[in-house]
Structures are given as C-alpha cells and as structure tokens.
Amino acid sequence: MAAKPYVIALEEHYVDPEVKRHYTGMDARQAPGIAERLEDVGQGRIAGMDAAGIDLQVLSHANPGLQKMDAETAARLARGANDRLHETVRAHPDRFAAFAAIPTPDPKAAADELERAVTRLGFKGALVNGLTNGAFLDERRFWPIFERAAALDVPLYMHPSTPHPAVVEAYYKDYVEKYPSLLRAAWGFTVETATQGVRLVLSGVFDAYPNLKIIIGHLGEGLPFYLWRITMGFERDGRGGKSFRDVFCEHFYVTTSGFFSDPALLCCMMELGIDRIMFSVDYPFVDNPPGAKWTETLPICSEDKEKLLNGNARRLLKI
C-alpha cells in the first residue's frame, strides 16, 4: 500500500479574541458551530485534522480581519494578534504555520508588521480580507505592502470579504434577505476578489515588483476559466507589453479552498500548470473530510498529486 501523502492546507482560518471584540454589525455575527471552531486553535482542531489526514494548517485570521478598521486601531491590534498566533504555532510547530494579519488601513504599518511577522515570528506571508475600507489594494498608497512582500520573498493571500455596500445595493439587495450567501461564497466573494486580481494586473504593480507573488483561493475565483477571454479583451485596447495571461500565470497561485471539483481543478491545471495550485480546505467554513476525501480520487498522476498536496506549498512558503 502506498504511503499516505503529507497534506498541507493553507487557507485555514481562526479568529483572534481581541480583534473579534472590535467587530460590529453583520461582521459580529457568526453561526455558533463556526464561531466555536474559529476560536479553537488547540486539540479540538488538531483532532479534526487527524481525522481527515491533514498534517499541517497554515492559519490565517478570518474575514473581515483588520481591513474595516481605522488605521490606528488596526495597527494596534495587528501586533497583538500576530504575537498570539505565533504562540499558537510555537505550541504545535509540527501542525501549524501562519499568515500574518496586517493593518492595511495604515499601509506603512502593514508593511512593517509584515516584515516583523516574517523575520521575527517566522510567518509565511500575510492574508488580506477583501477591500480596505472600501478601497482595492491596487491603489498606489498600498504599494509599500507589495514592495515589502516582494523584498521578503513571501506571498500575499487575497481573501474575499463581503462586497462594497454600493455593490450590494446595486447588484444584490433584491435577494440578500432570502439568500444571504449571495454576498459570500455563492457569488459576492467571487466577483469582489476576481476584480481585485484583475485590477492588480492592470495596475503595473508586477512591473514595479517583479518578485511579487499573490495567492487567490477558491481555484482563483473563476479567473483561470476566463483567462483566454480576459486576455483577448484587453488585447483590443492595444496597450502592448505582457498579456494579461502572461502576468497572471507568472505571479498568481491558486488554492482549492472550498472548491472540490475535478473539472475546475483540471481547467486550472491546463491554464496555470500544476505548479501553481495548492490544496486548501477553507476550514471551518468548509469541513475537512470532504476536501480530504476528494483528493483520494483525483484524476491526476501521483507526482502532480504530491505537488498539489504539499510540494508547491513547501516551495512557495519555504516549509
């Protein structure tokens, strides 16, 4: 019998109690079962990993993180949250690694906290939840964060959050009450995060920082499927330079978080190559067992499966 492959899952969430105390409105509400599992970064979480055959989780702060706070509050909370997460990893170094929570409302403080988390705490990069107080990260004021990530040679994980209120009003208000997931995994997360990815490519940030690496979950929020059409569309504008496809395939990685579909995975493999795809579950918003079970029957060779389950994450995150 073949040995069980080592499994790294890298979009796996928790919530810091001090950060959570500052949430308001919809952000402060969470289903009881989910809330309990977000707060558990000990034996209960590890037991669930063991039952599903997951060896290592890369922990990151759940949505909305620090992105909707004022600059002073976000900067103050970031340091404490990352220090506490560091202690969690230190307690179980063979089971957990970490992405930093960074205070993007204060871009310089975010860049500095990213550097501290990577160089002093051993974190593997940072995860950012959606827009920063309504602003996409391609705005020039946020570029110090990208500059620092490139210099440190660590990725930034672009994670969804609920859409901008104006978008909710224009696109979704008629159905939100009956179908609240329309703002989240059912559609809103995809549109907002894919738009973030497109804007980053158009902004020129990858020309400025050629070593910059971006991760997008949920198999790239649909962008791999649309690469041909997006590229064709922008070629009509006659701007020259690298194509959208070339930039995306050079700088972006995707994970399988909450997206356990053979056809979708094969599409991503055909468009991006297996070296840019990594396994994730999206725990606790998605249960571990379905993701782990899915990997057992993937229609890919053992070498590619090894890359998906651990090899690509080891290389990108230096695990």
Image: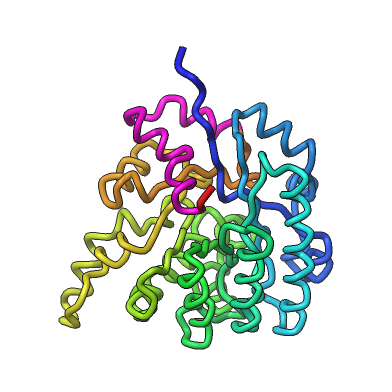
| In the image, residue 95 above or below residue 17 | above
- In the image, residue 308 lies in the stretch drawn in magenta: yes
**Percent from the top left, x then y, of residue 293?**
52, 28
User: Between 113 and 268, which is closer to the camera in this rendering?
Assistant: 113
For the record, the magenta segment spans 289-317
**Image position of 306 (left or right of 158):** left
How many discs appear? 0
When asked about the image quadrant of residue 84, the answer is: bottom right
**Percent from the top left, x then y, of residue 69?**
71, 78
Furthest residue toward front: 120
Furthest residue toward top: 1
Image colouring: rainbow
Identity of the residue drawn at 52% across and 87% down: 141
Q: Chief secondary structure of the magenta span?
A: helix
**Percent from the top left, x then y, of residue 142?**
52, 82
Identity of the residue drawn at 55% across and 62% down: 160
**Image position of 43 (left or right of 300):** right
| In the image, residue 81 above or below residue 50 | below
- In the image, residue 277 lies in the stretch drawn in magenta: no
Identity of the residue drawn at 36% across and 28% down: 302
When asked about the image quadrant of residue 22, the answer is: bottom right
User: Between 254 and 229, which is closer to the camera in this rendering?
Assistant: 254
**Percent from the top left, x then y, of residue 182?**
55, 58
Identity of the residue drawn at 36% across and 64% down: 251
| In the image, residue 2 above or below residue 201 | above
